[in-house]
Amino acid sequence: MTALQVGAIASALLCANAFAQPVGARLDHVVIAVHDLEAAKRLYSGLGFLIPSGSGRHPTGTENSAAHLSDGYLELITPYDTSLPDGRAIAERLKKGEGAVAACLQVASAEQTTRNLSAAVLKINGRTP
């Protein structure tokens, strides 16, 4: 997902609200693929983001760290095992360069939010447990 696509999601949320289409969602975090997690943590820390020490590992082949905002966070993510599904997907995305790959929403109802965002003309892939 490019910065333009993230902006499009934000615009669609705003437009849906402006046209009385209740979306019932808020931006929780943006996932940013990076080649070197430690270098990205230093860069974001230097920009003023609070970066906790350490990182998290997902059993699907990625590791991450958070750059905290006042409400939400940026998730810096990189593959550690490209033989696993998410590790492979992030590695493929990184061939195009670093950047935003997903915008994650916090919602009360995934089904209702899917309907509302679809009505706001956004392509929805469905929910992720």
Image: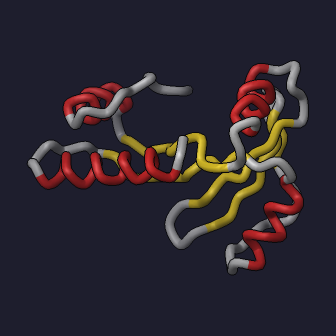
Query: Left of 45 or right of it: where is 101?
Result: left
Q: Residue at x 84, y 40 (%)?
A: 57
Q: Quadrant of residue 94?
A: top right
Q: Residue at x 22, y 37 (%)?
A: 120
- In which quadrant is the N terminus drawn? top right
Q: Nearer the viewer, residue 113 or 96?
A: 96
Query: What's the coloring here?
Result: secondary structure
What percent of the width, then of the height, locates residue 49? 68, 74
- Relative height, residue 128 to residue 31 (above, below): above
Query: Left of 60 or right of it: where is 102?
Result: left
Q: Residue at x 80, y 43 (%)?
A: 78
- In which quadrant is the C terminus drawn? top right
What percent of the width, then of the height, locates residue 2? 53, 46
- Relative height, residue 18 to residue 87 (above, below): below
- Relative height, residue 109 to residue 69 (above, below): above
Query: Left of 8 or right of it: where is 49?
Result: right
What percent of the width, then of the height, locates residue 53? 86, 65
Q: Residue at x 71, y 73 (%)?
A: 50
Q: Residue furthest front?
A: 96
Q: Residue furthest left?
A: 20
Q: Quadrant of residue 43?
A: bottom right
- Relative height, residue 85 to residue 118 (above, below): above
What percent of the width, then of the height, locates residue 76? 72, 52
In this figure, what is the number of numbered marks? 0
